[in-house]
């Protein structure tokens, strides 16, 4: 899970750095953006990162968690 709003390094900065790491582990990772943002801009931006599997708006519910793991 990755939030957009974090101290020191925000989620977008993390994704940029994470994608530059060309390890097999990174290629196998599925990043779920879990954030309070409902901005269409943020949702669209997340689609440009190959490691982002889904964009999920908070709050995290049992239904959302089940959908992510199925």
Image: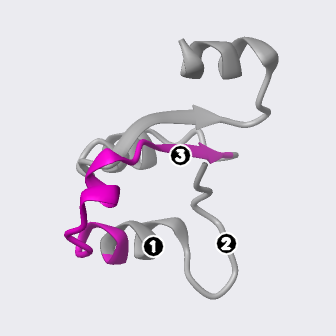
- Does dot 3 land on a helix, a strand or a loop? strand
Q: Which residues are magenta?
A: 17-35
Residue visible at 29% across and 41% down in the picture? 47
Q: Nearest the camera: 34 or 19? A: 19
- Does dot 2 land on a helix, a strand or a loop? loop
Q: CA distance from mark 1 to mark 2?
A: 10 Å
2 with respect to 19 (left or right): right
Residue at which label 2 appears: 6
Instruction: Assess whether mark 2 and mark 1 are in contact (beta carbons under 8 angstroms).
Output: yes
Q: Nearest the camera: 44 or 70? A: 70
Residue 66 placement: quadrant: top right
Q: Is residue 51 covered in magenta?
A: no
Residue 29 x, y percent position in the rendering? 39, 48
- Does dot 1 land on a helix, a strand or a loop? helix
Which label sits in the foreground, 1 or 2? 1
Q: Is residue 46 above or below residue 22?
A: above
Residue at which label 1 appears: 14
Residue visible at 32% across and 49% down in the picture? 51
Residue at which label 3 appears: 33
């Amino acid at each position: 899970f990755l939030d957009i709003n974090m101290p020191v390094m925000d989620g977008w900065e993390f994704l940029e750095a994470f994608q530059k790491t060309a390890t097999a582990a990174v290629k196998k990772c599925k990043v779920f953006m879990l954030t309070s943002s409902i901005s269409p801009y943020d949702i669209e931006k997340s689609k440009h990162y190959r490691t982002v599997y889904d964009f999920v708006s908070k709050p995290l519910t049992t239904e959302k968690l089940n959908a992510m793991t199925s």
